[in-house]
């Protein structure tokens, strides 16, 4: 039973990773690509690692998978934010059809 549940989590995780890769290729600008890839790949990789944790339990492999899940959940949003902010501050424009630029609006309001 545990192996079936683990396999389901692994397959769902691989599917989310695939969607993240497709989003990385298909999105029009760096900001959309970053959003699509970060969210999908974080969820997908955590799903795969959680499947490994279920399959192996709290053995050495399971504990390492759990630690990797925690590390990934803590670092992926921070790194995505840092990349997006650095990209925006370096002058990379948003896609022409983007609706708003809150960072620019907030920066202009402070000036």
Image (spheres, rainbow, N blue to C red):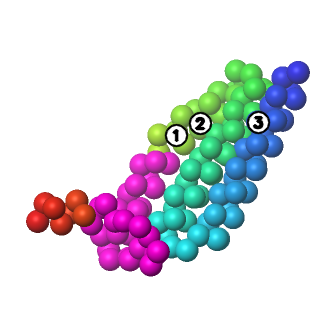
Q: Which residue is mark 3?
A: 9
Residue 43: in sight, yes or no?
yes
Instruction: Tell me if residue 44 comes above or below residue 35 in the rendering.
Output: above
Residue 86: in sight, yes or no?
no
State the CA–CA distance, disc 3 to disc 2.
Answer: 13 Å
Q: Which residue is mark 2?
A: 69
Where on the picture, by quarter, is residue 52?
top right
Q: Which residue is mark 1?
A: 73
Question: Where residue 90 sits: x, y (%)?
Answer: 32, 74
Mark 3 vs mark 2, foreground winner is 3
In the rendered structure, which segment of residues is drawn in magenta? Answer: 76-104
State the CA–CA distance, disc 1 to disc 2.
Answer: 6 Å
Is residue 76 toward the left or the right of residue 108 in the image? right
Residue pictured at 66% horizontal, 34% vertical: 65
Residue pictured at 69% horizontal, 53% vertical: 17
Mark closer to the chain start, 3 or 2: 3
Residue pictured at 45% horizontal, 55% vertical: 80
Question: Where residue 4 sits: x, y (%)?
Answer: 87, 29
Magenta stretch contains residue 27? no
Per the rendering, the mark at residue 26 is none
């Amino acid at each position: 039973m545990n192996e079936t549940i683990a396999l389901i989590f692994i397959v769902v995780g691989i599917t989310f990773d695939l969607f993240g890769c497709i989003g990385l290729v298909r999105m029009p600008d760096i900001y959309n690509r970053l959003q699509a890839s970060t969210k999908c790949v974080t969820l997908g990789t955590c799903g795969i690692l959680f499947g490994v944790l279920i399959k192996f339990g709290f053995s050495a492999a399971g504990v390492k998978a759990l630690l990797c899940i925690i590390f990934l959940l803590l670092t992926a949003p921070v790194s995505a934010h840092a990349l997006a902010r650095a990209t925006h501050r370096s002058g990379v424009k948003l896609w022409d059809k983007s609706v708003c630029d809150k960072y620019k609006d907030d920066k202009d309001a402070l000036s």
